[in-house]
Image (cartoon, rainbow, N blue to C red):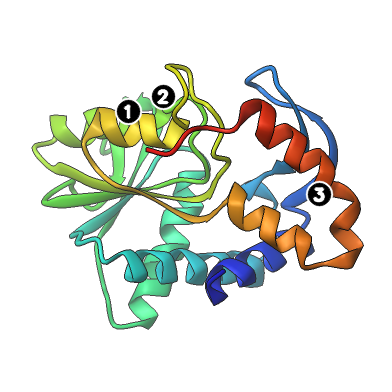
Amino acid sequence: MTAYRQRFLELALRADALRFGDFHLKSGRDSPYFFNAGDFKTGATLAGLAECYADALIERGIGFDMLFGPAYKGIPLATALALALARRGIDVPLSFNRKEAKTHGEGGLLIGAPLAGRVLIVDDVITAGTAIRESAALIRAAGATPCGVVIALDRQERGAEGARSAADEAADALGVPVVAVATLADLMAFVGDRPELALHRDRLLAYRARYGSSPG
């Protein structure tokens, strides 16, 4: 496991954004773990998370001209990532959307820089892929091009359409790469290396056996 993935999982555990137990997910599945990027709720934890996003992007080598954060969780994530990139000398514009169009003042759905060029979508996870597809449609409608998606965690579970993961389905549907800071496979390795988490490993293995996706 790369250093930034290890750092991300340790940070998520400390921030209580990664928890183990019994959780009923929106998908209807009962999961032995839960990840919520909304629990990165201090300046220090959000800054640490953004550095992990930046590391993942730089390792993957995706070219982009600006960032887009889908409302709502994508907004602070994209903002924090823009700051992390700026600290590395990569200063890019940032845009995000409203859930409902504003009818007064400047109006419209978008806040920040106009959508232009190659736009990287920044979000927390991909569940059904709906928010990502809506974001891509908004970007294309503005005359820009979605060039990729970066998320915190790929649960590597079967999506709605078959044996592949929701992230793979979204990548195929949009024709762009999806970069995850960490995956379920990384989480399994992380748990296996920490004695205090070892009791969760069997349940994670059973969950992966039941719901795990097939590659690509």
Q: How far apart are marks 2 and 3 (CA)?
A: 31 Å
Label 1: few (<14), some or many (≥20) within 10 Å? some
Of labels 2 and 3, the one closer to you: 3
Image check: 192 left or right of 67?
Answer: right
Which residue carries the number 2 mark?
A: 130
Residue depicted at 47% across the width and 33% down the height = 214
The numbered dot on residue 201 is: 3
Q: How far apart are marks 3 and 1 (CA)?
A: 33 Å
Q: In which quarter of the image is the N terminus?
A: bottom right
Q: Where is residue 36 in the image (x, y as percent from the top left)?
A: 67, 44
Residue depicted at 68% across the width and 60% down the height = 189
Label 3 sits on what residue type? Answer: Arg
In the displayed structure, 116 sits above or below 138; it is below
Residue depicted at 12% across the width and 42% down the height = 144
In the displayed structure, 66 sits above or below 143; it is below
Q: How far apart are marks 1 and 2 (CA)?
A: 5 Å
Is label 1 in contact with label 2 (beta carbons under 8 Å)? Answer: yes
Which residue carries the number 1 mark?
A: 133
Label 2: few (<14), some or many (≥20) within 10 Å? few
Residue 41 in sight in this render: no
Residue 199 in sight in this render: yes
Label 1 sits on what residue type? Answer: Arg
Is label 2 in contact with label 3 (beta carbons under 8 Å)? Answer: no
* Closer to the camera in the image, 174 or 202: 202
Q: Where is residue 3 in the image (x, y as percent from the top left)?
A: 56, 76
Residue depicted at 81% across the width and 49% down the height = 201
Q: Position of residue 142 (x, y in %)?
A: 13, 35
Sequence-wise, the earlier of marks 3 and 1 is 1
> Where, by quadrant of the figure, is residue 40 drawn?
bottom right
User: Element type at marker 1?
Assistant: helix
